[in-house]
Image (cartoon, helix red, strand yellow):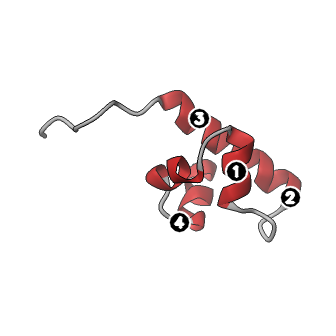
Amino acid sequence: MPPRKGRPRDERIDEDITTAALDLLSSEGFDRFSVEAVAARAGVAKTTVYRRFPTRNDLIVGALL
């Protein structure tokens, strides 16, 4: 596999995002869960979340795994 261009992803950010997603899911529930709220809670931009998880459902599944 050829090397990826650019800076490697920071695994701590992945963990921050999934932790924030789980916290938000447990405190607010599925209906009030949003990528914007996860990004704010994780201290990252929405684009950072979307680079890792293209959809809201992908984010929820990724956090639960």
Q: Which residue is mark 1?
A: 38
Q: Which residue is mark 4?
A: 55
Q: Which residue is mark 3?
A: 15
Residue at 59 percent of width and 46 percent of height: 45
Q: Position of residue 3 (x, y in %)?
A: 17, 35
Q: Position of residue 14 (x, y in %)?
A: 54, 38
Identify the mark nearer the N-term, 4 or 3: 3
> What is the C-alpha distance between the residues marked 1 and 4?
12 Å
Q: Is residue 53 left or right of residue 21?
A: left
Amino acid type of the residue that numbered disc 1 sits on in the rendered structure: Val
Identify the mark nearer the N-term, 1 or 3: 3
Amino acid type of the residue that numbered disc 3 sits on in the rendered structure: Glu
Q: Are marks 1 and 3 in contact (CB under 8 Å)?
A: no
Q: State the image quarter where residue 36 is shown.
A: bottom right
Query: Are there few (<14), some (14-19), or many (20+) residues within 10 Å of tag 4?
Result: few
Residue at 63 percent of width and 51 percent of height: 64
Q: Is residue 9 left or right of residue 34?
A: left
Q: Is residue 39 left or right of residue 53?
A: right
Dot 3: what SS? helix
> What is the C-alpha distance between the residues marked 2 and 3?
19 Å
Dot 4: what SS? loop
Residue situated furthest left in the rendering: 2
Q: Is residue 17 above or below residue 10?
A: below
> What is the C-alpha distance between the residues marked 1 and 2?
11 Å
Query: Are there few (<14), some (14-19), or many (20+) residues within 10 Å of tag 1?
Result: many
Dot 1: what SS? helix
> What is the C-alpha distance between the residues marked 4 and 3?
17 Å
Give the position of the N terminus as an image quadrant: top left
Identify the mark nearer the N-term, 1 or 4: 1
Q: Is residue 31 above or below residue 62?
A: below
